[in-house]
Image (spheres, helix red, strand yellow):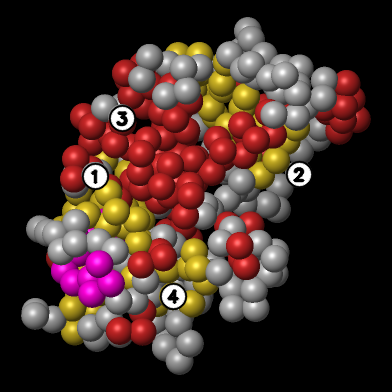
């Protein structure tokens, strides 16, 4: 085999991003399934790790291989779980070794003690290398139709979990939601809107952009696009999926939800900012209308499988249009340089 290229950082050291041309072959201990990398998606988490905000190398190593939005093709699988040539993605989070009650039943997305590990983020090597290994338990097979867009599985798994929990909370009463508001038209917001349209709901997406691809991508789903503040919307949604993390938007969505409404927060706020806000009025609204606000992050295997099904059902040309740049590994620094017009940037290992 040819040498392994790997995109790496020294965790918590700003601007330490490097392409290593002779990275070691993936160790058998990583998993029985050997995979040839096709692509990895890039998101804000990668940018934060590169900036030195967080990240943790595997035990005994100084550098962390990036990449948690994976897509690969199976080279070898002696377990028979998948077949050579199959498309595969690797689940990002692994349960903690203790384990906590949730990790013990494979709900590692709900880990209670924080000892989980994550590929390309926390103590596990990522997928931004020519070859990687994965345990069968953490390998998700993909429909061949998803070859151009399978790296979208990880962000889709996040919103698949969000919708799973929204619907489970909804069973607390007779609940027949009609309208959904998604705030933010980045990859997570657009994929959340996709899953909402697949549920036959009336979908509204709010974002600040008035030009570029976002408005048309929303309309192509049959959804309605808004560029106005949340407070100016003329309806009270049954469900809100908040994907910006912007504090003012988060608070506005809590106030905007209709009676028995459910607000799911998926955007992560940066903190360190205060807002003059009437907390008492918000409390009154939530209590008197029986509303629920909850946070959602990561996903377990069930959600990854739901996400794979959702992507396979989607309009493939629409999914392809989410990818605004495909950058070859040789130009890796360009892939990790933000551009105001990007929706999803992909690092392409086939080019």
Q: Is residue 204 visible?
A: yes
> In the image, residue 105 lies at what x, y percent?
61, 62
The mark nearer the N terminus, 3 or 1, is: 1
Looking at the figure, which quarter contains the C terminus? bottom left
Mark 3 Cα shell of 10 Å, populated few (<14), some (14-19), many (≥20)? some
Question: Which residue is at a point 61% across and 46% down the rendered structure image?
Answer: 296
Judging by the rendered image, the residue that carries numbered circle 4 is: 124
**What secondary structure do most residues of the magenta stretch adopt?**
strand
Q: Is residue 190 left or right of residue 232?
A: left
User: Element type at marker 3?
Assistant: loop
Of 53 and 187, nearer the camera is 187
Measured in 3D between alpha carbons, the distance from the residue under mark 3 to the one under mark 2, in whole angstroms, is 40 Å
Judging by the rendered image, the residue that carries numbered circle 2 is: 274
The mark nearer the N terminus, 3 or 2, is: 2
Residue range (magenta): 70-80
> In the image, residue 309 lies at what x, y percent?
36, 39
Q: Is residue 336 visible?
A: no
User: Element type at marker 4?
Assistant: strand
Label number found at residue 165: none
Judging by the rendered image, the residue that carries numbered circle 3 is: 314
Measured in 3D between alpha carbons, the distance from the residue under mark 3 to the one under mark 4, in whole angstroms, is 31 Å
Instruction: Please name which of the two marks, 2 or 4, marks the residue nearer to the observer.
Output: 4
Of 196 and 31, nearer the camera is 31
């Amino acid at each position: 085999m040819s040498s392994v290229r790997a995109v790496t950082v020294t965790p918590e050291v700003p601007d330490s991003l490097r392409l290593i041309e002779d990275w070691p072959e993936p160790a058998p201990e990583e998993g029985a399934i050997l995979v040839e990398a096709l692509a990895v998606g890039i998101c804000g988490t990668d940018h934060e790790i590169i900036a030195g905000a967080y990240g943790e190398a595997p035990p005994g190593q100084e550098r962390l291989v990036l990449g948690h939005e994976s897509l690969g093709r199976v080279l070898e699988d002696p377990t028979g779980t998948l077949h050579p040539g199959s498309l595969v993605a690797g689940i990002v989070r692994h349960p903690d070794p203790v384990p906590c009650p949730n990790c013990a039943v494979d709900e590692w997305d709900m880990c209670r003690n924080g000892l989980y590990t994550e590929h390309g983020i926390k103590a596990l090597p990522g997928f931004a290398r020519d070859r990687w290994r994965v345990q069968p338990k953490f390998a998700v097979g993909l429909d061949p139709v998803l070859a151009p867009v399978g790296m979208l599985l990880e962000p889709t798994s996040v919103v698949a979990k969000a919708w799973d929990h929204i619907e489970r909370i909804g069973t607390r009463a007779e609940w027949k939601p009609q309208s959904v508001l998604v705030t933010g038209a980045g990859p997570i917001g657009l994929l959340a809107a996709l899953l909402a349209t697949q549920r036959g709901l009336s979908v509204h997406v709010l974002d600040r952009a008035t030009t570029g691809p976002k408005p048309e991508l929303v309309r192509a789903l049959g959804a309605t696009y808004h560029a106005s503040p949340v407070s100016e919307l003329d309806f009270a949604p049954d469900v809100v999926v908040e994907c910006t993390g912007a504090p003012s938007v988060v608070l506005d969505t809590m106030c905007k939800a209709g009676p028995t409404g459910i607000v799911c927060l998926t955007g992560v706020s940066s903190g360190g900012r205060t807002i003059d806000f009437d907390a008492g009025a918000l409390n009154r609204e939530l209590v008197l209308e029986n509303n629920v606000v909850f946070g959602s992050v990561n996903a377990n295997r069930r959600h990854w499988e739901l996400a794979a099904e959702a992507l396979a059902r989607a309009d493939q040309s629409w999914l392809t249009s989410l990818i605004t740049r495909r950058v070859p590994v040789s130009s890796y620094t360009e892939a990790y340089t933000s551009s105001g017009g990007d929706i999803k940037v992909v690092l392409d290992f086939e080019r």
